Image (cartoon, rainbow, N blue to C red):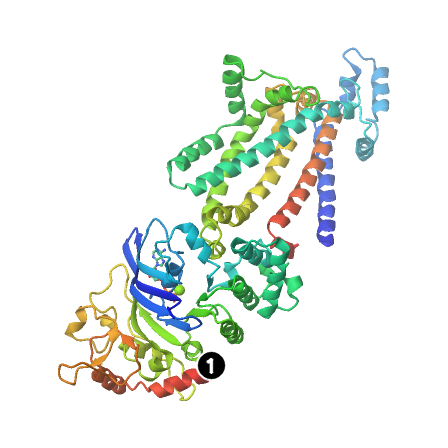
Amino acid sequence: MARFALRRLFQAVIVLFFVSVFTFLIFQVIPDGTPALRLAGKSATPQTIAAVVRQWGFNKPIWVQYADMMGRIFTGSVISYSEHVNVLSQIERGLPATLSLAIGAGVIWFVFAVVVGALCAVRAGHFIDRLLTLLSLTAISAPTFVVGALGLYFLAWRVHVFPLSGYVPLSQSVGQWFMHLVLPWISLSVVYIGLYSRVLRSTMLDNMHEDYVRTARAKGLSERKILIRHVLRTSLIPIVSMWGLDFAGVIGGGAILVEVVFNLDGVGQYAAESIQALDVPPLMVIVMYGAVLVVLIAALVDVLYVWLDPRVRLEA
Amino acid sequence: MAPLLEVERLGVRFHTDGGVVRAVDGVSFALAHGKVLAIVGESGSGKSVTALSLMGLTRSANTELDGAVRFDGKDLLNAPEDELRRVRGGGMAMIFQNPMTALNPVQRVGAQIVEQIRTHERISRSEAWERTVALLRRVGIPRPEVRARAYPHEFSGGMRQRVMIAAALSCAPRLIVADEPTTALDVTTQSQIMDELEQLCRESTVALILITHDIGLVARMADDVMVMYGGRVLEHAPADALFEDPLHPYTWALLRSVPRLDRERVGRLPTIGGSPPSLLNPPAGCHFRPRCPHSFDRCVEVPPLRESVDPAADGEEVRGKQDEGHLDRCWLDLDTKRRLRHLDRLDTQAVALACTDGAA
Ligand SMILES: Nc1ncnc2c1ncn2[C@@H]1O[C@H](COP(=O)(O)OP(=O)(O)OP(=O)(O)O)[C@@H](O)[C@H]1O
Ligand SMILES: [Mg+2]
């Protein structure tokens, strides 16, 4: 297990290194190489530009710039081009909204997928299974922004069930926090609920015919216990690994769209605004922190996976 | 004393897309406390379906069951599901053919036995755990306190089957149904496991239904033998009677295909010509008729399963000098059978010898 963890850590460091280099190159080098011109303002004299270049270190070799940037990311002292504010404090401001959105959606889609998938498997071929199958397939083919827009139009605009947009901190009002997040959660989760419940349904139907399920029945267990402890337990393995990847995907980008649509003012929205302003430092920081988070989640899912499926341990 | 298990005209029909499969057709037998009944027959003869149906494991929307299965005097075939659950794994336990897949791969083996114990008895987790460890020790698993915490993939096939046996024994059953318990294992492990199973059954007077293709094993362990074919019982007799005086042509064919150590053979073992009947569309009359070298016009009627009688003493039916309770399902009369068997050159004594030799 220790060797397994060590290898994972090594892999993570490699991944983070490449992510940082590529992000740096993409954002720093490719979009018009002279950010100093933009930073110095429209009517800048050559002296001002030179001062800006020196101040931001644009005259240094590219790898030195890279090293400086990494150093500042690690110490949390990156300053943005556009407003000259500390990026970290900006991120901290947006973090609660983003985490509320992502974690809430992740929990919702997992729980609903398990309920829907298990229900379909148990009632396979019956009315409820067919209905839920139809809904799942619809959900899978509905893009996030369509669900979001429809939700906004019907449930916030036409009928005022939910607020139109914005984010209310959890510390301020639990009820308001919840109401403001319902529509974003739904628009983010719907696709995954559809997808995961399909996968769970077919895995469970396969596993129901496994020998160990017959053994469980021969031991005298009730159908409910057989279903939960034996069929469901083993069928969770594939969707847990899917969940890890997709949750990381949401953190690493999927949330941006929803944050913008619902004006949640989270980290994703900050990233979107920075892209529009070609403001490189915040993007670097957000991408790097996002990458660290994704790598951490992946490692966590691996641990969870090993716990769910002990056979994996041998291969580690 | 009343028999432990009485099966009366058990019938199992599966409704499939292709039609109705009559997997078990009028199977009757009784088993006394502590006895060993072997069920033999080719693949597809309905042995497993019979065994599974005893504890209601074939129940489903597409299955039609009839007849009666009385265990301890109570009918199980029509019992409600919760009553049946109390018997499963409690009074009647089952050991399956493939130990590689019969255990849940993601649950510790000890937990799987604890789960069974706590389904049937209201005892604490730690008590159940202690009993599990003791059971694992009893079936010959070294360091059971440690091994109980391991997962199935950390065990060899033989060790997993020992775990299954321990689970079967865990709630003091009166009957164990073992469906080809050693087929998936290598030969040395097979005989070890069977020795242990036999001893465990004898010392706790558990009755055993043993389904097997291994005639040597039957000779060694069984009190009674039931030969099945095409969902029906063709011959049912005490083991020694069956080996010394087998009466059904199908049984002869089965016995002839036993490998013999006492005689050098050229070429292959004789196999039974033809293939088992389709249960979707079985032949009329005796199911063995299409493959039977001795069939005659009467065989298009289904023969009854009965004790062979000697019709020689005019009108008055006199029992042949055979053991009581030796049933077979064939229209030939007793003398003809014995004569034909002799002509077929089935040396029954040599077979019996080979079987016991093979077992030794
Ligand atoms: N659930 C089912 N649905 C339809 N047919 C079935 C079902 N279970 C078994 N059968 C059929 O019933 C027949 C008897 O099968 P069974 O498994 O009892 O044979 P067996 O004697 O145990 O053979 P083997 O020695 O190969 O284990 C077979 O033809 C099989 O295809
Ligand atoms: Mg079988």
Residue lying furthest left: B314
Residue A309 visible to an observer of this rendering = yes
Left or right: B182 as drawn, with respect to A84 = left
Q: Quadrant of the N terminus of chain B?
A: bottom left
Residue B85 vertical position relative to residue B183 in the rendered view, above or below: above
Left or right: B39 as drawn, with respect to B284 = right
Q: Quadrant of residue A133?
A: top left
Q: Which residue is mark 1?
A: B359
Residue drawn at point x = 39 percent, y = 36 percent: A130
Residue B172 vertical position relative to residue A195 in the rendered view, above or below: below
Residue lying furthest top: A43
10 Å crowding of disc 1: few (<14), some (14-19), many (20+) = some
Percent position of residue B221, x then y: 44, 77
Q: Quadrant of residue B156?
A: bottom right
Residue B279 or B90: which is nearer the viewer? B90
Q: Circle 1 sits in a helix, a strand or a loop, which is it?
A: helix
Residue drawn at point x = 78 percent, y = 23 percent: A89
Percent position of residue A32, x then y: 71, 24
At label 1, which amino acid type do we have? Answer: Ala
Q: Quadrant of ligand 2?
A: bottom left
Residue B151 visible to an observer of this rendering = no
Percent position of residue A73, x then y: 79, 31
**Disc 1 chain ID:** B
Residue A133 or B222: which is nearer the viewer? B222
Residue A314 or A54: which is nearer the viewer? A314
Residue A208 vertical position relative to residue A81 in the rendered view, above or below: below
Residue B57 vertical position relative to residue B319 in the rendered view, above or below: above
Residue drawn at point x = 60 percent, y = 33 percent: A106
